[in-house]
Image (tube, rainbow, N blue to C red):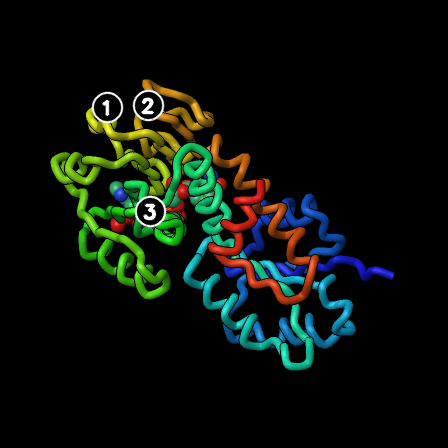
Amino acid sequence: MEKRKILIQLDSDPQASVFDRVVAIDAGADELFSYAGVKPEQVQGLVHGAIFTRKASDLKSTAIFVGGSDVAMGEKLLAECVKHMAPQYGLRVSAMLDSNGANTTAAAAVRAAARHMDLKGAAALVLGGTGPVGQRVARLLAREGADVRVASRQQSKAAAVCQEIAGRVTGANLQPIGVSSPQELSSGLKGRTLVIAAGAAGVVLLPESARSAATSLKVAIDLNAVPPLGIEGIDVMDKAKDQNGVICYGAIGVGDTKMKVHRLAIAKLFEQNDHVLDAEEIYQLASTL
Ligand SMILES: NC(=O)c1ccc[n+]([C@@H]2O[C@H](COP(=O)([O-])OP(=O)(O)OC[C@H]3O[C@@H](n4cnc5c(N)ncnc54)[C@H](OP(=O)(O)O)[C@@H]3O)[C@@H](O)[C@H]2O)c1
């Protein structure tokens, strides 16, 4: 008989995310064990509890979800999870990272763009490219073979992100740019066919005047759902809305795919016991939608 599906939620915040808990149940978890305020040094015991309790053949019915608002901490927690499994004995469980919704959001955004253009060779600009979501968007675009400009108010921050991505993605075509003035923003937009804005909530990164002057744009995607929005003139609900020849998505327009990807990824965890779902794997799942 199939064991009940147990999802173990390791959340770095003081309170485990209600959002992640609801999605876990909707995605088919039968039981949810939620741990809040999880620190890397506590992961070993939690993982051992997961892998030493069921037969190896039943471990596909136990899985780990790493969340919380701190994406860097989430990455550490996931690395600890992987480190403390015992694959040589088949004693491991699948795990997924989606701290701050960064992986599912980035995957959904890049997937939205891919519906309208060939990403290979696409001239892309990622505004807010230094945040956790923006970094993943840039990484996924680079993997798809896009020519990616990563923007920041400080060019040096964008350069550090490009370097990090180049270390992971062989042949990545990346250019760091500073966008601290309207002139820099307009030169960063020159020739770009895709812009994805992943700036902080409530911050306009692309004003209407700069956007309407960017005549090469074909697809514009904003991930900020908190007014004022990241790209002026794109509504939060826009979903593949054609505005004078530019296909536009707002944060909620992308959110529908994000939710589907999140649920799909959790369901995937219970198919076998050796999945590790990070940005790339979650993007692959998004591509099947
Ligand atoms: N739809 C969803 O389900 C969903 C899920 C997760 C996140 N989001 C949204 O996705 C966006 C990105 O999330 P995130 O966590 O990666 O964002 P974040 O880390 O808060 O910010 C991203 C970048 O925005 C820039 N920024 C910050 N304050 C700024 C300011 N006052 N003026 C101009 N630029 C500023 C910073 O880049 P520089 O310092 O390098 O300029 C920062 O690295 C957010 O709007 C978030 O709300 C949506």
Q: Residue 192 bears which disc, if any?
A: none
Kind of residue at disc 3: Ala
Residue 90 visible to an observer of this rendering: yes
Closer to viewer: mark 3 or mark 1: 3
Q: Which residue is mark 2?
A: 233
User: Is label 3 in a helix, a strand or a loop?
Assistant: loop
Which residue is tagged 3? 146
The disc at residue 212 is 1
Q: Position of residue 238 (x, y in %)?
A: 44, 25
Query: Image height check: is 90 above or below 189?
Result: below
Residue at 54% of width from left, 45% of height from top?
Answer: 286
Percent position of residue 103, x then y: 48, 51
Tag 1, which secondary structure?
Answer: helix
Neighbor class of circle 2 (other Cα within 10 Å; few <14, some 14-19, many 20+) is: some
- Residue 61: image location, x then y, percent: 74, 61
Q: Residue at image x 70%, y 56%?
A: 32
Mark 3 surroundings: few (<14), some (14-19) or many (≥20) residues within 10 A: many
The amino acid marked with disc number 2 is Gly
Q: Are marks 3 and 1 in contact (CB under 8 Å)?
A: no
